Image (cartoon, grey):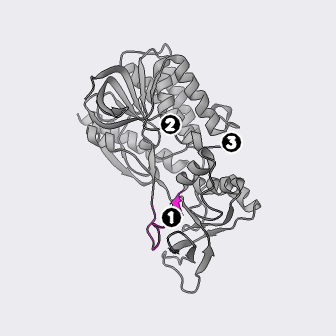
Amino acid sequence: MAGAEVTEVAVVGGGPAGLSAALAARQAGAKVIVVDENAAPGGQLRKQIHKFFGSKEHHAGRRGFRIAEELVAACREQGVELWTDTLAYGIFDHTLGIVRGGTASTLAARSIVLATGASENALAFPGCTLPGVMGAGAAQTFINLHRVLPGRRALIVGAGNVGLIITYQLLQAGAEVLGVVEAAPRIGGYAVHAAKIRRAGVPIYTRHTVLNAAGHGELEEVTIAALDENGWPIAGSERTFAIDLLCLAVGLTPLTELAWQAGCLFEYCGPLGGHVPLHSEDMETTVPGLFVAGDMAGVEEASTALEEGRLAGLAAAAYAGYRSPNLEEEKAAARERLQALRSGPFGEGRYLAHEEIVRRWLKWRDAR
């Protein structure tokens, strides 16, 4: 094992939350190292070719991959060290176990921000392991990063934002999308995304599910069926599609292994994707000096991850002894932007869920 490295703030994950945290901590004066297992930083932003919407503060009108480029450039300009192709496999007090360049070593820090993201959920049905059945994120990697079309005739499972967006991106890439299958009685994504694919002639089958997939060595066809009010397939409603690509956009689960290993207290929260660490308004967990941000603190949008990352970065720098001149004002502004992002019918459940996570953290703190 190589010798130990030392920094003031270590960030695990180079996606929107991690880069935002690193930039905020560095601007506050701390030495910052970002550890990311991918070949290039940027995370999911690198796959997002669509324009963000909302306010100017939330990067409205900007494409995700452009935001990633600007964040990476800003981090490098400010002196953040970006360690790509580096795996964080363990956390021991305030020390990370890492593998870099094929060599195991450690990285010690005064404070650590975990921004490890989330993994795609799977869906089990006969034939789900056939080549051609993949997560929506995998399809985005093919078409948006590598410019490879993973299939010519596709069906999408899941009418949340991810499912609706990958539908449109596949159309842009030249694929034929035969429909979007959604078990719920209504779509879960924004109406603007749904309207876009409907205008392109793609039907959305609500109250439907996949029964099975079939093919000789690879995906050739998928059968779906309508669901009754109890969620059971309705006999006689089956419909079979000849396709070579089935994209699963059925939710994400926070990647929280390092937080579990560190001894953080957790709470199960369905609207946020599963078990998430209890954390304060400043994104500090029940382990002092360990902060979380982005999807691992609860699955939401990239805009939210950016704001959570900024909060966590400011707080992590302060824990390490570096307080920006207007620290409280900056944190208050970030919280206001988060509240704005979580307002409205789609964000209300997540807003209340985050409020409950913070309340439970406060209860834990007061009971100590």
Q: Which residues are magenta?
A: 122-135
Q: Which mark is residue 131?
A: 1
Q: Residue at x 71, y 59 (%)?
A: 197
In the image, is residue 334 above or below residue 48? above
**Mark 1 burial class by Cα count in 10 Å: few <14, some 14-19, many 20+:** some
Q: Which mark is residue 15?
A: 2
Counting from the top left corner in percent of width and height, residue 255 is at: 39, 46
Q: Nearer the viewer, mark 2 or mark 1?
A: 1
Foreground of the two, 339 or 304: 304
Q: Nearer the viewer, mark 3 or mark 1?
A: 1
Q: Residue at x 27, y 41 (%)?
A: 261
The N terminus, quarter of image: top left
Mark nearer the N terminus (3 vs 2): 2
Our reading of the magenta stretch's main secondary structure is loop
In the image, is residue 151 above or below residue 85? below
Indicate the amino acid at tag 1.
Answer: Pro
Which element is circle 1 on? Answer: loop
Residue 242 as seen in the image, left or right of residue 118? right
Q: Which mark is residue 51?
A: 3
Counting from the top left corner in percent of width and height, residue 235 is at: 54, 86
